[in-house]
Image (cartoon, rainbow, N blue to C red):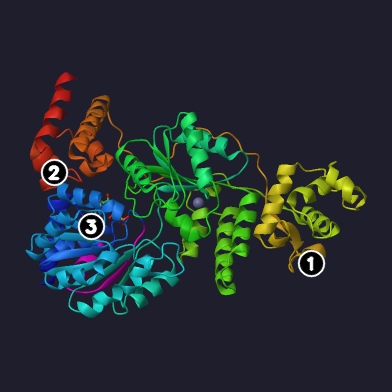
Amino acid sequence: MKDDTRSRALQVLQSVFGYPVFRGEQAEIIDLIAQGGDALVLMPTGGGKSLCYQIPSLIRDGCGVVISPLIALMQDQVDALAELGVRAAFLNSTQSFDESMRTERALRMGELDLLYVAPERLLTPRCLELLEASNIALFAIDEAHCVAQWGHDFRPEYIRLSVLHERFPGVPRIALTATADFQTRAEIAERLQLGNARQFVSSFDRPNIRYQIVEKENVRRQLLDFIQSEHAGDAGIVYCLSRKKVEETAEFLNESGVPALPYHAGMEHAVRSRHQSRFLREDGIVMVATIAFGMGIDKPDVRFVAHLDLPKSLEGYYQETGRAGRDGTAANAWMAYGLQDVVQQRRMIDESDADDNFKRVQSAKLDAMLGLCETLTCRRVRLLDYFGQQSAPCGNCDTCMSPPSAFDATEAVQKLLSTIYRVGQRFGAGHVLDVLRGSDSEKIRQWRHQDLSTFGIGSDKAEAEWRAILRQVIAFGLVDIDHENYGALKLSAQARAVLKGEQQIMLRRYLKPVKSKRTSVKPKGFTETDLSTEQQSIFERLRWWRVETARTHNVPAYVIFHDASLREIAKAMPVSLDALRQVSGVGEKKLESYGEQIIALVNDVSAAA
Ligand code: ADP
Ligand code: ZN
């Protein structure tokens, strides 16, 4: 029996999905669910979670029910499955009464392999009765971290999903998420009553993503420079904190010749979904968005994710950057970070109405995020360590590739701290730095601060250098910001030891940002198949063919074939269906739908060459 499900699963993988082998723990997970067990699966974005419930749904009797909050993506998911010859449908509030009636009937008649349902829909008495009257193969709870109350994706309906266990005790359940932290994992297991489920925790490393954090100066220029030099023509996501900044940045990129679209929760729903759909369907669009954008976006060829503002936590940073490079080929996670980010994030925590306990948690999360920004060692090691995973320096992040230099900043920090103290801990960064550097300003004259003993003792350093020092000192908690008092800088309890000379302070040396050179984003260990001129022209033709085909079928291009499959076809130059079948990503249904066309196209180009 056991070997039977195993070989059946492999056969489905090959014939339906066209992939030769399972990845990571997919085989074990599928085996467990196919045999009726429960599982909690933590796998990074792009790890291949969908197959973990799609294949058991195809093997088991009945229909697999997938619960997902991502209504806007269901149509694409169902279309993608249809391309593979899988009978899939969805139930959510976007469809007409007739459509949902048709889907309900198909489910009852046993004509569906997979059904996607929004959680609020699932919980209606009508839907639960429908499920009871139908043959259900399994329940897959996607984006399971939505059950976590402190996460930013919390959905109250998710808590009520424990009803599945009570009403369908015999149906296996699989909960899946790309969120890695222990607390969320425990919360999922508890709230969904998955205490007895087997947990599968994959490595959270995304080796194809290159992490870079640069010092913020003129952030728009820096962004444009980064896109033009490293990502001309690529699809990417740019995250900003505010809606206003989203709109301004999108406009700026467009004016500079980079096709960009804004996306935030304040936009009209129809416009927002049009932008999302263009991003998914067209090549080379840059989405400028707040964090409202991105959950569940499974566009495989997003080549970069840029942050113009500091995320609140490493969980957020990891999740957002993880949307780059799902197809496993080289991608960039780029962030610009500066003093203002630290000040702003600290203020947001201080000024929120949350209780003290919540604020403490947020503050600890921010500290971990700041630790990543200020680290003198490998970013990836830091990031994975936060998720409880040990690793060695990666060679594919900015600190590995050009190690920052540290310097003994004890004296400089003492100067800064005493200046803060001398001005009575009542002034913000701008004024403190003016006093320190001995500048002339009206405010200085007004308060007679030119008479202070610390006036001008920091004139040896440029303002940008001082800002970098102040940023780090705030990040490390030596200086607090009094938000109730117009952002006045105050010494923390820890500052005393430094002022008394009892503690040495090493800081990251300020480096003037340089214009980025066109560097290859190809990380070590990744080989992009090199194509001959003839193969290259086949590849180009295939891409055109894909655009046309995707348009006729009204699906995103990657639903037809991924770039990687097209490249492989171009390289193999198949002359028969059997040869084409060997290409990863070419299953039986696609072979039947497109095989002849592709072989004719390959022949055409070869004949012309
Ligand atoms: P996740 O939901 O974990 O982010 P997906 O399920 O969307 O990831 O899978 C990411 C990509 O990897 C998809 O394009 C999928 O088709 C591909 N994939 C998944 N499993 C395999 C496999 N065993 N072999 C080849 N490609 C795979
Ligand atoms: Zn590294």
Is there a contact, CB below 8 Å, between mark 3 and mark 1? Answer: no
Q: Amino acid at mark 1?
A: Arg
Q: Is residue 517 magenta?
A: no
Quadrant of residue 546 in the image? top left
Percent position of residue 432, x then y: 79, 51
Is the residue 530 above or below the residue 280 in the image?
A: above
Q: Secondary structure at mark 1?
A: helix
The nearer-to-camera label among 3 and 1 is 1
- Secondary structure type for disc 3: loop
Mark 3 vs mark 1: which is more N-terminal? 3
Q: Is residue 329 visible?
A: no
Q: As displayed, is residue 331 above or below residue 147?
A: above
Task: Indicate the quadrant where residue 8 lies.
Answer: bottom left
Nearer-N-terminus badge (2/3): 3
Taking the image as shown, residue 32 lies to the left or right of residue 446, namely: left
* Residue ID for mark 3: 22
Per the image, label 2 sits on a secondary structure element best described as: helix
